[in-house]
Image (cartoon, helix red, strand yellow):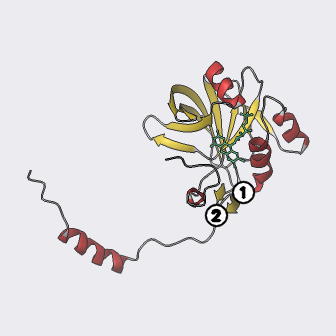
């Protein structure tokens, strides 16, 4: 079955917003990608799922590198601009700079990174896999900057959110009971 954009059920996903920076046929560019995830610890891999029509798609195919900047909660404007128009038609970097936001040059690859983002990683493309109408670009992290001071912006129900109340892990007393139950449900691994 299809899972169309805006379906009430898939709005239950709560995600980060990756601000994906690139360079290539469309010049220095930035796009918003909620489908941005860490895929592996060793080596450190990040996957980004990008519509084949996007300027970012062509840029990454050409240069084989990209920047992952996790949008901070006070950068919602960056998410809306980056996700609201294409680098095929608009110099989003120029527009964002005019609004007072800053970029800096990446250390190891030729892209711009977003100042003040919650996380900034420079990635070298190691694989691209077509999944339906998107391509997942798998990047090996070759440079990771110190964590930003600000928490990430969250996308949930098509709205922006700030990280809220902490839900404590189960108390020790509850864990003792849970451990007892797990013990009872242990599988017989002799097979
Ligand atoms: C909050 C938000 C999240 C988005 N997530 C994705 C995503 O994960 N993958 C994708 O291909 N497009 C996503 N988009 C849409 C692209 O950002 C949009 O098509 C953008 O114009 C592409 O820019 P480009 O053509 O300059 O690469 C998202 C847009 C917004 C506003």
- Disc 1 to disc 2: CB gap under 8 Å: yes
Badge 1: residue crowd in 10 Å (few <14, some 14–19, many ≥20): many
Q: Earlier in the sequence, mark 1 or mark 2?
A: 1
> Percent from the top left, x then y, of residue 90?
84, 33
Residue drawn where x is 63% and y is 68% of the image: 164
Give the answer, above or below, for where 66 lies relative to 95. Answer: above
Residue drawn where x is 80% and y is 50% of the image: 77
Badge 2: residue crowd in 10 Å (few <14, some 14–19, many ≥20): few
* Label 1 near ligand 1 (CB < 8 Å): no
Q: Mark 2 points at which residue?
A: 163
Q: What element carries label 2?
A: loop
Q: What element carries label 1?
A: helix
> Percent from the top left, x then y, of residue 178?
29, 74
Q: Which residue, as the protein is rendered here, is positioned at the far left?
A: 190
Q: Which residue, as the protein is rendered here, is positioned at the far right?
A: 98
* Residue 138 seen: yes
């Amino acid at each position: 079955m299809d899972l169309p954009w805006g379906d009430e059920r898939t709005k239950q996903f709560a995600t980060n917003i990756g601000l994906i920076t690139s360079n290539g046929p469309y010049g220095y560019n930035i796009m918003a990608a909620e489908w941005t995830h860490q895929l592996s610890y060793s080596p450190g891999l990040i996957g980004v799922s990008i519509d084949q029509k996007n300027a970012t798609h062509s840029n990454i195919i050409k240069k084989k590198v990209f920047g992952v900047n996790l949008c901070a909660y006070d950068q919602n404007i960056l998410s809306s601009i980056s996700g609201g128009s294409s680098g095929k038609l608009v110099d989003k970097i120029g527009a964002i700079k005019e609004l007072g936001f800053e970029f800096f040059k990446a250390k190891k690859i030729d892209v711009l990174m977003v100042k003040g983002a919650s996380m900034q990683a420079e990635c070298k493309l190691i694989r691209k896999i077509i999944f339906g109408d998107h391509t997942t670009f798998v990047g090996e992290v070759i440079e990771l900057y110190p964590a930003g001071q600000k928490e990430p912006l969250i996308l949930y129900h098509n709205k922006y959110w700030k990280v809220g109340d902490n839900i404590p892990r189960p108390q020790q007393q509850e864990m003792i009971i849970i451990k007892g139950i797990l013990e009872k449900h242990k599988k017989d691994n002799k097979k």
